[in-house]
Image (tube, rainbow, N blue to C red):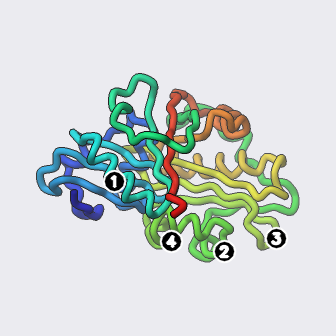
Amino acid sequence: MLEITSDQVTPELGSFFDLTRPTAIRALAVLAGGNAGRIFTDDPSRPTWALVWEADDGTLYRGGNYDRNILFDVVTLLRQEGVVALGFRDGDSDTGLFPPDPQAGAECLEFVRSIGSSDLSPYLAAPPAGYSIQKMDRPLLEISPKNEENLNRYGSLANFLDKGIAVCILHGEDIVCEAYADMDIRGMREIGVRTQEAHRRQGLATLTCAALINLCEQAGSRTYWDCARLNAGSVSLAHKLGFQNERAYKRLAWFKPLN
């Protein structure tokens, strides 16, 4: 088993992963150097398998002809850093290779919004009085409440500024809502949003996401949305913003050992 960097990824290794698998856009972002993570394979030049771990949410993506022992060894290694999750759809054949005794599980949904699939203009209006909306630059990213998470997800602010897009809403000088779009992967960007608790229920997430989607579509990118099935607010927001092609999947997780 070898660990490689994104600049060692060959087209052959990348072909092990496609967008039909749950949240596979993140695996491809790690392979392309947009998202932080770790990449394992048997042979960088002539691979027969590859496993890709996305650092932000801990999902481990599988590709090629790996076996139970390879998967177990990589999961064991990565659990020394933190959570490791495996996503799958009902009927996936490789779930029998998963390690035993997962410590958590969730049912999730993913959606795709095609360019121009719905009219965003009702949500592109100015925010409520006292708020302003801006595209995020380095100074705003540096004061973001999500700065530490962003460094974990993208590796550096420079990397995100080179490949991603972000929009925020300010209340005075404070960032109270922010939405991020990862690097373009085969014509699509994953987006996510967070609103500070004291400023929720005012439609800020809708406005921020609409502005971000608009920028993504101007750049020629579709957008992708992922959330837990039980997160009714996120599911509702996805529908409001014109996300379709709903697909269900499940996640199992193994945490860092207590000892």
Q: What amino acid is found at the position of numbered circle 1 in the picture?
A: Val
Q: Earlier in the sequence, mark 4 or mark 1?
A: 1
Mark 3 crowdedness (10 Å alpha carbons): few <14, some 14-19, many ≥20: few
Q: Which numbered disc covers residue 143?
A: 2
CA gap, disc 2 and disc 3: 13 Å
Picture quadrant of residue 179: bottom right
Q: Few, some or many C-alpha atoms within 10 Å of disc 1 (few <14, some 14-19, many ≥20)?
A: some
The Cα atoms of the two marked residues, 4 and 1, are separated by: 28 Å
Q: Where residue 200 sits: x, y (%)?
A: 81, 51
Q: Which residue is mark 4?
A: 157
Residue assigned mark 3: 172
Which element carries disc 1, helix, strand or loop? helix
Give the residue type that dot 4 points to.
Answer: Leu
Q: Residue type at mark 2?
A: Ile
Task: Pinpoint residue 122: horizontal percent, then vertical percent.
Answer: 73, 39
Front: mark 4 or 1: 1
The answer to whether mark 1 and mark 2 are in CB contact below 8 A is no
Report how far apart the C-alphas of labels 3 and 4 lie in the structure: 23 Å
Q: Does any portion of residue 223 appear in the rendered image? A: no
Q: Which residue extends farthest top?
A: 91
The circle on residue 74 is: 1
Q: Residue at x 44, y 62 (%)?
A: 80
Point out the tag, 4 or 2, that comes first from the N-terminus. 2
